[in-house]
Amino acid sequence: MPGSLEPLDLGVQIPYHFRCPISLELMCDPVTVSTGQTYDRTSIESWVATGNTTCPVTRAPLTDFTLIPNHTLRRLIQDWCVANRSFGVERIPTPKQPADPALVRSLLTQASSESNATHSRLTALRRLRGLARDSDKNRSVISSLNAREILLQVVFANMDSELSHESLALLVMFPLGESECVSVVSDSDRIAYLSRLLFHSSIDVRINSAALIEIVVAGTRSPELRAQVSNVDEIFEGVIEIMKNPISSYPRALKIGVKALFALCLVKQTRTKAVSAGAAETLIDRLSDFEKCDAERALATIELLCRVPAGCAAFAAHALTVPLLVKIILKISDRATEYAAGALLSLCSESEMSQRDAVAAGVLTQLLLLVQSDCTDRAKRKAQLLLKLLRDSWPEDSIGNSDDFPCSEVVIRFCCS
C-alpha cells in the first residue's frame, strides 16, 4: 500500500492513512468500526444511513454500528497539519463527541418532570439546547427520544413562564410532524399564546414564537386550520414588527419573519390583513437585506399580496416597488425573476402609473433579456404578457432605435401577436 497519494495543489502530499477510504479526503474525525477499519465519521455515517451493512474496505458484515473515536490517529493528523501549515494546511478542529442517548434521555426526563424544581428543569433544557446547537447528529439523537412531544407539552403547560420560553427555543430547532402541527393549530389557546409572544419584551422569544408559527402553519395541510391561524388578531402585526429589527443585531429576525409571513399569506382570505398590517412597506424596505433564499420567499410573498386589490394599491404607492422589481429580474435566481415578473404583471395590470414607472426603470430591456434566457417557462409567459400589456407605453423610438436587432424582433413579435 503506498505511503501517500498524489500531490495536492497545496504542494504537499497527504499521507495515505490520513485519508478516509470512502471520501479520500483528509479525515477530520476518524472513527473505527467493528472490523477495525478507520473512516471519517461523516463518511461512514452516510454510508450506513443509505442502508449499507458491510465495511466499505473489507466488505465484512458490521457486527454492530458503534463508532469508536480514533484519538491517536486524530492527534497524528493534527500534528501533521501543524507541521505543514506553511503549505496552507489548516489544523483540523477537535471534534465534539455525539450526545450520549442515555444522557439525552435523562435530561428530557429532568426537563419534563413537574416534580423537579424550575431551576433544575431550566438547566436541563439549556444543556439540551447546547447539545442541539453542536451538530445535526445531536439533534437527530434528541429528536429520536420523543423530544418534540415532550417540549410541546412543556411549552403550553407552562405558559408565560421562563420554562415555556426555554422549551420554545429548543423546540424550534426541530421539524414537526403533521400531527404535532395540527395539535397546535387546532387549539385556539395555543395559537393565541404564540400570538401574544410575538409582542414579548425579549426579541429572542418573539423570534422563536414566529418560528413555531411558521413551522406549524407550513406543516398543516388543512386550509381551514391555516386560515384560523392567519385570522388571529395582530398575528400579522407581530410578525411584521419582527422583520423591522436591524439585521446586524438580530440576524435571525428577518429570516424567520419572512418565512412566517409567507406561510401566513398562503391563506388567500387573510392577505388583506397582511397588507393592513404594513407588509407591503416592510417587504420593499427590507428587500435588499435578504439573502438569496429569503429574497425568493420575500418576492413570492410580494407576488401573493399583489393578487389582492389592497396589496396592489399598497405596493404601487411605494416609490421603490417597481424600480426594485425591475432591477431584480435576472439578478438573483430564476425563481426570484419569476416572482418579480409576476408581481410587476399584477401591478401594471391595475395601475397606469406602475406601467410608466416600469418603462422608466428600463423594464423593456429586462423583459427582452428574460424571454430569450434559460429562465423558467412560467417566468417567460409572465414576461410575454407584460410586454403585450405595456406595448402602448413604450417610447416611440424604443424599438426602432434599438441597437440590438434580435431584441427588436422579439418585441415586435410579442407586441403584434
Image (spheres, rainbow, N blue to C red):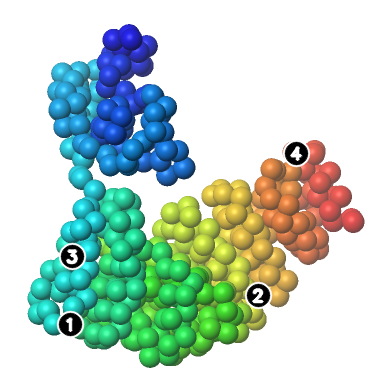
* Kind of residue indicated by mark 3: Ser
Res 30 → quadrant = top left
CB contact under 8 Å: marks 4 and 1: no
Of marks 2 and 3, the one in the foreground: 3
Q: CA distance from mark 3 to mark 1?
A: 14 Å
Looking at the rendering, in which quadrant would you find the N terminus? Answer: top left
Lateral position of residue 65 relative to residue 111, left or right? right
Q: CA distance from mark 3 to mark 4?
A: 70 Å
Instruction: State the residue position of label 1.
Output: 114
| Residue at the top extreme of this rendering | 2
Q: Secondary structure at mark 2?
A: loop
Which disc number belongs to residue 106? 3
Instruction: State the residue position of label 4.
Output: 404
**Earlier along the polypeptide chain: callout 4 or callout 1?**
1
Residue at coordinates 42% horizontally, 38% vertically from top-left?
Answer: 53
Instruction: State the residue position of label 2.
Output: 307
